[in-house]
Every structure is written in C-alpha cells, then in structure tokens.
Amino acid sequence: QVQLVESGGGLVQPGGSLRLSCAASRSIFSFNTMGWYRQAPGKERELVAGITSGDSTNYADSVKGRFTISRDNAKNTVYLQMNSLKPEDTAVYYCNAKSRVNVEIWVDYWGQGTQVTVSS
C-alpha cells in the first residue's frame, strides 16, 4: 500500500510563503506523475501543479509564476514552494501520485491533505 504524507501547511499572511512536502513510502520513480491538488470549501478539487518522472511540469494559471513544484528522488519527496500567497489560495492541499498500469488504466494515490490558510 502506497502512503503519501504531506506536511508544511499552516497559517500565513498575504504575500507570505510556505513550502509543502509530500513524502512517499516507495520510490517516486515508480509513479508516472506526481502533483498537488487543492480543494477550497464549497469548491471542487483542482490541480495546482504536476511533475512527471521526466521532470516536466505544469501549473494552474492561477498559480503560474508564484508556485514551483520540484522533486527530490533520493528522498522520495515532492515539494510545492508557494510564494506571494493570496487569500484565494486558502484550501486543503493534497498530494497525488499516478501510476499507469496499462494503456487504459491509471491508479491514483492520495495523501491525507494539509490545510493552508492565507489571512491577515
């Protein structure tokens, strides 16, 4: 069973920074992609940033230029550096890992989530 454990959330003032970490219980090379999603109250879960095993990255338009996703393969950890935080970034942030079983089937793994609150 794969475990993803997030950390680094908390309360921060607008304009501040936080770094989220997601530690996997097995080599992150085994996942095709890893990413961060978020869900605010009353809203659907949305992709924030993703990174492939080949280090290609993608970002939601709302966070481009402010957030950076990275990975440390030796530590089996993926990070989300969040700068210039805004109140609308407030949400529960979830780590996700995807493994492709075959051409049609993907398996998703999720962490338990970490709360990020941006408020003065």
Image: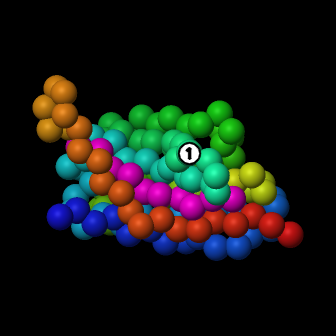
Query: Residue 50 versus residue 117: which sits nearer the camera?
Result: 117
Q: Residue 82 at x, y = what percent? A: 64, 56
- Residue at point 51% right, 42% down? 47
Q: Is residue 82 visible?
A: no
Quick one: which residue is furthest to the right in this view?
120
Q: Position of residue 100 (x, y in %)?
A: 20, 37
Quadrant of the image containing the N terminus: bottom left
Q: Main secondary structure of the magenta part?
A: strand
Helix, strand or loop at label 1? It is: loop
Tell me how many marks there are.
Answer: 1
Where is residue 7 drawn, in percent x and y?
49, 72
Quarter-wise, where is residue 4 in the image? bottom left
Residue that badge 1 annotates: 44
Crowd tier of the residue under label 1, counting other residues whose Cα lies within 10 Å: few below 14, some 14–19, many 20 or above: few
What stretch of residues is rendered in magenta?
A: 90-99
Residue 32 picture location, percent across and down: 27, 40
- Residue type for callout 1: Glu
Quadrant placement of the C terminus: bottom right
Considering every residue shown, the one lying at the far front of the view is 42
Tell whether 118 sits left or right of 47.
right
Q: Is residue 60 left or right of residue 5?
A: right
Q: Is residue 18 visible in the rendered structure shown here? A: yes
Q: Residue furthest top?
A: 103
Q: Residue at x 28, y 66 (%)?
A: 3
Q: Is residue 115 magenta?
A: no
Identity of the residue drawn at 64% across and 52% down: 42
